Image (spheres, rainbow, N blue to C red):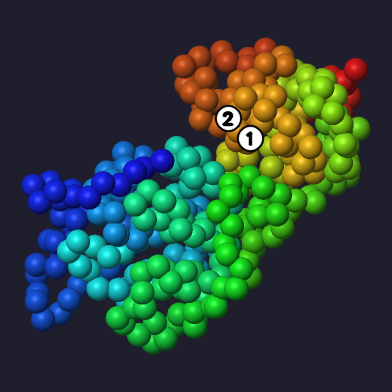
Amino acid sequence: MNSSTPLSSHDPGPAVEDSAKKNSGSSQTPQTCTVTDIATEADFTSHTSSLPSTTLQVVYFHAPWAAPCKQMSAVLSALASTYTMETPPTVVFLSINAEEVSEVSEAYQVTQVPYIVLQKDGKTLDTISGGDASQVRAAVEKHAGKAQGNPGKLGLPPAQKVTKPIPTEPLDQSHSEGDTNGDTNGSTKNLSAYAPDSSDPATAPQYSSGEKNDATKEELHERLSELVKAAPVMLFMKGTPSAPQCGFSRQTVSVLREHGVRYGFFNILADDEVRQGLKEFAEWPTFPQVWVGGELVGGLDILKEEFENDAEFLKDYSVSGKGGPAGAKQQATPA
């Protein structure tokens, strides 16, 4: 996504310049690293592209509504302070609100928080999902070397010896997803088997049982072509409107509700065949996905843009009062 090139002496770049300024204050008391907040995609590109190929970048994705992120933010701040600022930098810590800077989140396929990427020279070295502070410390020390300070005095747990490589495949895989909203024990939940309960409105119930069907590609595409038309407006999301399992799905539900749109939904975490097949069928690799009249509109960003550009967008599917998932009797049923 962001290839890094060595810096010339004439153009050190903002990240290196910041480090040099902070180091120039005192030769006797070295400055320690801090966590830099990244506000925009341009800001992220500016920081990462200006770094030498030897600099380890610790990129931390978080969301304000996720309880484990509060602990992880404190952990990373403490861990960063144990490393001395150098010129050029040996390690930098970057913090990104996964929902506010969605372009970067989508590029890294972030679907749960906290999520940390360790990269160098444009290459991903490790990824860590969840709130295990000892695992984060172990990964950073593995690639940046042991800190100069005393992590123990800052309350950091001992580094965990990682015996199994951290997966670097996209987070849009069933074994590595979860919801961190309301999870107070610092870990993420495995929600690959999550399915709507009886309190949720049904949408194409014969397709959301969580059972795996060994269908041929042609049969799967036929099934998907019916499913995307199961309601006039269909939302394919992680979780359900009453219990969304990622921030992007939660925001999409909020946008539709704000505009009074009635819609059908499908929980892709309950059916991996639909989840994987829809990526190819739609030629759209991420979720959530919004479909109208059997045609793909897009994800969260496109949905927002459509409403911003056209106040009448989806007006034909809106009702008085707040929008939300339509009841089973109000939805179209696949043939």
Q: Residue drawn at (64%, 20%), measured in percent from left and top? A: 296
Tell me which amino acid carries mark 2: Gly
Q: Nearer the viewer, residue 251 or 93?
A: 93
Image position of 228 (left or right of 70): right
Dividing the picture into quarters, in which one does residue 235 lie?
top right
* Residue 265 appears in the rendering: yes
Could you say which disc has been placed on residue 299 in the image?
A: 2
Mark 1 residue type: Pro
Asked whether 335 or 217 is in front, the reply is 217
**Callout 1 secondary element:** loop
Q: Is residue 210 above or below residue 266?
A: below
Relative to 216, 249 lies left or right:
left
Of the two numbered discs 2 and 1 on the same chain, state the one appearing first in sequence.
Answer: 1
Residue 160, percent from left and from top: 54, 78
Query: How many circles with numbers are drawn on the protein?
Result: 2
Q: CA distance from mark 2 to mark 1?
A: 6 Å
Q: Residue at x 76, y 28 (%)?
A: 264
The residue shown at (40%, 68%) is 143
Residue 64 disc label: none
In the image, is residue 235 above or below residue 59?
above
| Residue corresponding to mark 1 | 288
**Residue 170 percent coordinates (x, y):** 58, 47
- CB atoms at circles 2 and 1 under 8 Å apart? yes
**Around disc 1, counting alpha carbons within 10 Å, would you say few (fewer than 14), some (14 to 19), or many (20 or more)?**
many
Q: Quadrant of residue 85?
A: bottom left
Q: Quadrant of the N terminus?
A: top left
Q: Is residue 64 visible?
A: no
The residue closer to the viewer here, 302 or 310, is 302
